[in-house]
Image (cartoon, rainbow, N blue to C red):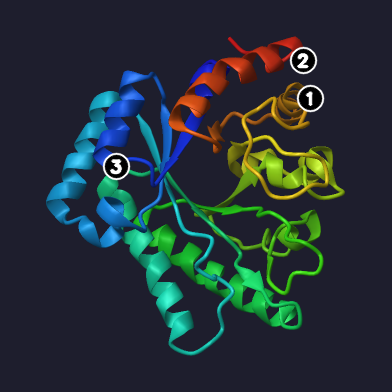
Amino acid sequence: MNLRDRIGVDISRRLRLEDAIEWAAKNGVRYVDIQLDTAANAITAFDNKRCAGVRAQIEKHGLHLGLHTLSAVNVAEYSPHVGEAVDEYLKNHVDIFPKLGAEWMVVHAGYHFTSDKKMRMDAGKERLKRIAAYAEKKKALVLLENLNKEPADAEVHYLAHTVEEWQFYWDIASPAFKLSFTANHAHLVPEGVEGFVAALDFSKVGEVRLADCFRNGHEVHLKPGAGDLDFGRMFRLIERKGFKGHYTNAFGTLEDMLAARDYLVEKARAAGVKVD
């Protein structure tokens, strides 16, 4: 598969899932990512009949579907009852995974409130172990994403936003557990894309997520070219590590993400990456 076909689109909550599938098929997009948290796409809105219809659409068009859990749901939750609800939220995504014909689901490490970082990390890791074990039974694939940094003086911080924090979870031993590498989040911290790529075993990376931003800056999801992330160099580093998976555009409008595929391929080609 050529590089352009490997670059998908994060639909998020922009379209009803069935409409998203038709939009992707019409526009030659092979990989789509969807959020199942709100409105017509709320996970509770899918009965077996609707799931079967979605799966039939996916198979008809030869698309690849991923689910994206909400980063606002704190996977590092340790409070009684609330923590149990987080478990159920993740399990529900695993349960619907085979019904929809999904191929991956992105999860997060949660967030801490500065003074309770270790407790949060430990709680989150145990929860991810449980969900990975549950995913094995359902033949689902869980991808843990590296998230963005928050301002230094903020009370709340996402976990797994540095290489060191992300690595804390990498020893979760399960064939149902891999990683989702968000390049623009790496660009926000001192390690940069190069530091993350050097640390990663790309046989354990199921997806690379893309947007532009500014080096050591703040969390923004800009169109490629609107920030200073060197996408040509990024593709060269990642492809030379043997990555064969898909990329996901996650910025702007659907039209922005569609148009950016050609821009990204040209940046990769100019950097000496095989794109065809």
* Residue 157: quarter of image: bottom right
User: Quick one: 45 or 88, which is closer to the camera?
Assistant: 45
Discs 2, 1 touching: Cβ within 8 Å: yes
Please provide percent x and percent y for residue 143: 54, 51
* Side of 166 relative to 38 (left or right): right
- Residue 274 is at least partly visible in this image: no
The amino acid beneath tag 1 is: Arg
- Mark sitting on residue 271: 2
Could you classify mark 2 by the number of other residues whose Cα lies within 10 Å: few (under 14), some (14-19), or many (20 or more)?
some
Q: Give the residue type at disc 2.
A: Ala
Percent x, y for residue 161?
A: 72, 57
Residue 250, picture quadrant: top right
Residue 172 higher or lower than 227, as above or below: below
Q: Which mark is residue 17?
A: 3
First reached walking from the N terminus: tag 3 or tag 2:
3
Whether residue 229 is visible: yes
Element under disc 3: helix
Q: Which residue is mark 1?
A: 233
Q: Are marks 3 and 2 in contact (CB under 8 Å)?
A: no
List x then y, in percent, for residue 154: 74, 69
Amino acid on which the number 3 mark rests in the picture? Leu
Horizontally, residue 69 falls left or right of residue 251, namely: left
The Cα atoms of the two marked residues, 1 and 3, are separated by 34 Å
Between residue 89 and residue 240, name the one nearer to us: 89
Residue at 62% across, 63% down: 172
Q: Secondary structure at mark 1?
A: helix
- Is 123 placed above or below 34 here? below
